[in-house]
Amino acid sequence: MGFDHPAGSRDSGKLLLTSIGAVYIVAGIAWVIGQIIHGEPLVNLLIVPLLVGIPGLVVLLGTHRLPRTDVDSDFYSVIGKWCLGSIGVSIVVLIVYHVLPTDSLSNPSRSILILSALSSVAGFGIGIHDARAKTRAREVTQRNRELQQVRAQLERSNERLEQFAYAASHDLEEPLRMVTSYLSLLEDRYGDELDEEGEEFIEFAVDGADRMKSMIDALLEYSRVETRGEPMEPVDLADVLATVTKNLEIQIAESDATIELEELPRVMGDRGQLQHVFQNLLSNALEYSEDEPPRVTVSASRDDSMWIVSVQDNGIGIPRESQEDIFEVFERLHTREEHAGTGIGLALCKRVVERHGGDIWVESEPGEGSTFSVSLPTVGPQREIEPRREGY
C-alpha cells in the first residue's frame, strides 16, 4: 500500500474480526451440545450449526485473506465495527419483535443466534466496501501529497536551471563580445594585408560568434517560458496577428507574400508569448517558400473548449517522418546555408503552447505546403466565425 502503520493498529482490527468469526463457530457447536444434553435428537439440530457456523467460518476465512486484498490494515477495525453494528441491529430488532404484545418468537435465543450470525456476514461485506473506499481515499491523499512534493521539487529545479541559464549566458556573452571585437579590430588594422582567404576566415569566425550569441539568447528565452510568463488573460488573436504582420512587414514585402487573416477569436493566454508563437510560424512560412511568392492563410475553428488556430502555407513542405522531430531543441531539416535559424524556434513555440494547456502539430507533404495548428483555451461562450479576409 505504501503506508507504514503501527503493528498494534493492524493486529487489533484483525483480532476483533477473528474473534467474531470464532465466537459464532463455537456458538453453533455449543448450541448443538446443549440441545443434545436436553434430549434433542442430533438429526433435528443440523440447521442451527449450519446457519450459525458457516457465517462464522466466512468471517474467519475472510479475515485470514484480508492481508492479500487491497484493504489497508488500518481499516480492519472499520470492518469489525460494521460486523458488530449489524449484529447489534439484528439483536435489537428481534428483541423488540419478541416483546410486542401481539407477536413473539417461539425460540428467541435460536432466532437471535441465527440472525445475528447472518448479519455478521452482511456487516463484514459492508465493512470491506467501506474500508476499501477509505483505503482509496488515503491513497489519493498520499499521491496528491507526493505530487505536490514533486511539483515543488520541479519548481525549485526549474528555478535553479533558469539561474544557471542566465549565469551561463551572461558569462558567455562577455567572451563572445571580446572575440567579435578583436576580430573586427584585426580586420580594421590588418585588413589591407590579408588576402581573400584570410578575410574569409575572419568572416567565418564573426559569423560563428554571432550564431552562438543567438543560440544562447534563444536557450535563455526557452528556459524562462514558465517563470517569466505573464498571467493568463483574454487575448484577441486578431490584434496579435495584426502586430505580427506589422513586425514582418519588410519580410512580407521583400518576398511579395500574401497574408490572409480570417476571423480570429479571443483566447486565454499570455499576449507576448502568443505573439512570439505566431510571429515564428509566419516567419517560417515566408522563409520556407518555393520559388513562387508565399501565400499564407491564418484561420480558426472551435473544438469544444479549445480554439484550433491554423497557419497554412504553400511552401516546401515537411517529410512525414520529420514532423515530430522539428519541435525538438536544435532539430534542423536544412543546413544554415540553406535556411538561417537557431533550431530552437519551434521547440520554444511548443513549450509556450503547452504552458497554455494546448498543443501544436503540423500536417504537411513535401512540395505541397504545411499547416501548423495550435490549440488554445477559449474565453466565454462560443463566438461565431464569419468568413472575412484581410490581405497583406
Image (tube, rainbow, N blue to C red):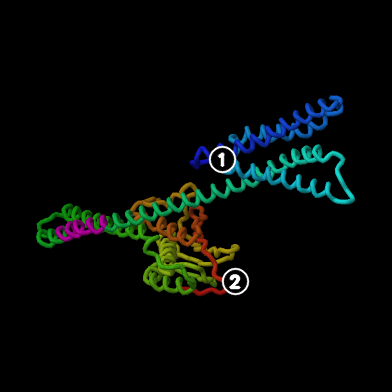
Looking at the image, residue 39 sits to the left or right of residue 139; the answer is right
Mark 1 nearby-residue class (10 Å; few <14, some 14–19, many ≥20): many
Is residue 181 highlighted in magenta? yes
Identify residue for label 1: 73
Identify residue for label 2: 381
Select label 1 or label 2 by which is in front: 1
> Which image quadrant is residue 379 in?
bottom right
Looking at the image, residue 17 sits to the left or right of residue 33; the answer is left
Q: Which mark is residue 268?
A: none
Task: Please name whichever residue, 149 or 69, is drawn nearer the observer in this view of the structure.
Answer: 69
Residue 70's x, y, as percent? Answer: 59, 40
Mark 2 nearby-residue class (10 Å; few <14, some 14–19, many ≥20): few
Task: Give me the residue at 64% from left, 47% from top.
Answer: 130
Residue 276's x, y, as percent? Answer: 40, 65
Q: Element under label 2?
A: loop
Residue 341's x, y, as percent? Answer: 34, 57
Would you place residue 246 above or below residue 154 in this image? below
Would you place residue 248 above or below residue 205 in this image? below
Task: Please name whichever residue, 299 or 260, is drawn nearer the observer in this view of the structure.
Answer: 299
Residue 9's x, y, as percent? Answer: 54, 41
Looking at the image, residue 215 sits to the left or right of residue 47; the answer is left
Task: Give me the residue at 69% from left, 34% from top.
Answer: 23
**Residue type pointed to by label 2:** Pro
Q: Element under label 1?
A: helix
Tell me which label, 1 or 2, sits earlier in the chain. Answer: 1
- Please give the range of residues in magenta: 167-182
**Residue type pointed to by label 1:** Ser
> Which image quadrant is residue 71 in?
top right
Residue at the far front in the pictured view? 38
Is residue 140 highlighted in magenta? no
